[in-house]
Image (spheres, rainbow, N blue to C red):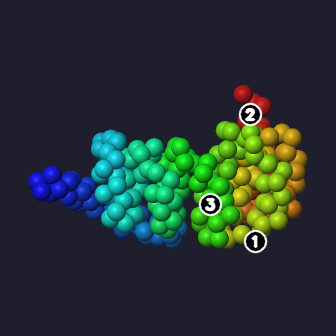
Amino acid sequence: MAETTLKESKVAEVMAELAELEDPKIREVNEKHGDDHGVNLGKLRALAKRLKTQQELACQLWETADTAARLLAILICRPKAFDRDELDVMVRESLPPKVHDWLVSYVVKKSPHAEALRLTWFDDPDPAIASAGWALTTERVTKKPEGLDLAGLLDVIEAEMKDAPDRLKWAMNHCLAQIGIDHAEHRARALDIGERLEVLKDYPTSPGCTSPFAPIWITEMVRRQHAK
């Protein structure tokens, strides 16, 4: 009983600290992107660094369903401790884009179940889940392309990216760019697909940042590789 109370006290303590970090101005900006929290991510990372890895606390914070708490949970969890079904459920209930992106990038990609989940999610009818499958595919395009049908991926991108929902469109576009960047034999086709589909061609880009428009992105990253 005392142990349960102690655990509940720890969660309450962390939740109170997150509440103190809440900034209405940050929340206003985040909510425009679908992220319902107002915590500065630098401060959130500092809190995670202080807490260090705590798998049980991470699970308890996740169960609160609070967006800031879930982001913190992702930072202090042990990615390999989750089984495949747990990760599938977690991704499917991660509606805020930042939670979804962090969960896939910081947890699922480090999991021994990443490839099985990639195959499960790739053709999911929910575009948000399919985007996770594409994100894991992009990881393989760069780090472990053996066995991937890169030409087949380009076929799908060419046929479906233009009309895909936004989150899926971004994920497919990232895959297109990485194929062009990392695989010279497919670069000309990747550039051609990007030029013809014009996905994200007019996306506003801050000074000093690379445009997400695939032809510009590919060309710039290849230039940097050759400049090394």
Type of amino acid at the residue the image marks with label 2: Gln
Mark earlier in primary sequence (3, 2):
3
Report the residue at 50% width, 53% height from top.
Answer: 84
Quadrant in the picture for the C terminus: top right
Type of amino acid at the residue the image marks with label 3: Trp
Report the residue at 37% width, 66% height from top.
Answer: 65
The residue wearing badge 2 is: 225
Foreground tag (1 vs 2): 1
Q: Quarter-wise, where is residue 160 in the image? A: bottom right
- Secondary structure at numbered mark 1: loop
Q: Is residue 157 left or right of residue 42?
A: right
Mark earlier in primary sequence (1, 3):
3
Mark earlier in primary sequence (1, 2):
1
Report the residue at 79% width, 48% height from top.
Answer: 149
Q: From this view, report whether residue 191 is shown above or below residue 183.
A: below
> Label 3 neighbourhood size at 10 Å, few (<14), some (14-19), many (20+)?
many
Query: Residue 132: x, y in percent?
Result: 60, 58
The residue wearing badge 3 is: 121
- Secondary structure at numbered mark 2: helix
Q: Nearer the viewer, residue 172 or 81?
A: 81
Q: Nearer the viewer, residue 180 or 33?
A: 180
> Label 1 neighbourhood size at 10 Å, few (<14), some (14-19), many (20+)?
few
Residue 23 in view of the camera: no
Question: Are the two marked residues, 3 and 2, in contact with CB atoms closer than 8 angstroms?
Answer: no
Question: Are the two marked residues, 1 and 3, in contact with CB atoms closer than 8 angstroms?
Answer: no
The residue wearing badge 1 is: 163
Foreground tag (3 vs 2): 3
